[in-house]
Image: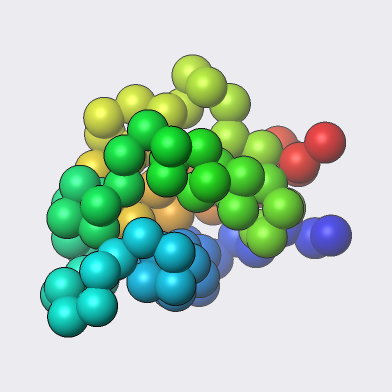
């Protein structure tokens, strides 16, 4: 799988995944919303990281799971895009 490198496409895919799996119906959530608003707790975060690896083809090292990178889907997408550009494929 060739990893996606466009942060806007990545953010859209992450939001779609969150809406399908975590965001309660009727809750307003987009790529700039805080992840906590989507109901993403530690268990959901594991699912989100696995989606990054399996669905986007990029492994997100634990060292990149920081408050800054997990502030929103946009910040996570920027992190994933940088990892993809740096050649951090899933294993």
Residue 6, image quadrant: bottom right
Percent across and percent down for residue 79 are 46, 43
Asked whether, in this view, residue 72 is left or right of residue 6, the answer is left
Quadrant of res 45: top left
Quarter of the image with the N terminus is bottom right
| Percent position of residue 44, x then y | 42, 45
Q: Residue 63, image x and y in percent?
A: 49, 19
Q: Would residue 51 appear left or right of 63 to someone viewing this image? A: right
Which residue is nearer to you in this view: 64 or 39? 39
Question: Can residue 7 be spotted in the picture?
Answer: yes
Rendered residue at 44%/54% (across/down): 77
Above or below — where is 10 with respect to 84? below
Q: Quadrant of residue 18?
A: bottom left
Q: Residue furthest top?
A: 63
Give 38 or 86, whichever is nearer the viewer. 38
The colour scheme of the drawn protein is rainbow
Name the image quarter holding the C terminus: top right
Q: Residue furthest bottom?
A: 26
Q: Position of residue 60 (x, y in %)?
A: 58, 35
Q: Residue at x 60, y 53 (%)?
A: 51
Q: Is residue 18 above or below residue 50?
A: below
Please tell me which residue lies in front, 43 or 62.
Answer: 43
- Number of numbered discs overlaid on the protein picture: 0
- Residue found 80% across the figure and 60% down from its top: 2
Task: Note whether residue 8 is visible.
Answer: no
């Amino acid at each position: 799988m060739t990893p996606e490198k466009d942060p806007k496409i990545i953010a859209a895919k992450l939001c779609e995944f969150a809406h399908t799996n975590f965001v309660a119906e009727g809750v307003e959530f987009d790529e700039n919303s805080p992840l906590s608003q989507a109901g993403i707790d530690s268990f959901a975060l594991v699912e989100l990281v696995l989606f990054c690896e399996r669905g986007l083809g990029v492994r997100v090292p634990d060292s990149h799971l920081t408050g800054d990178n997990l502030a929103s889907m946009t910040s996570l997408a920027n992190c994933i895009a940088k990892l993809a550009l740096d050649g951090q494929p899933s294993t």
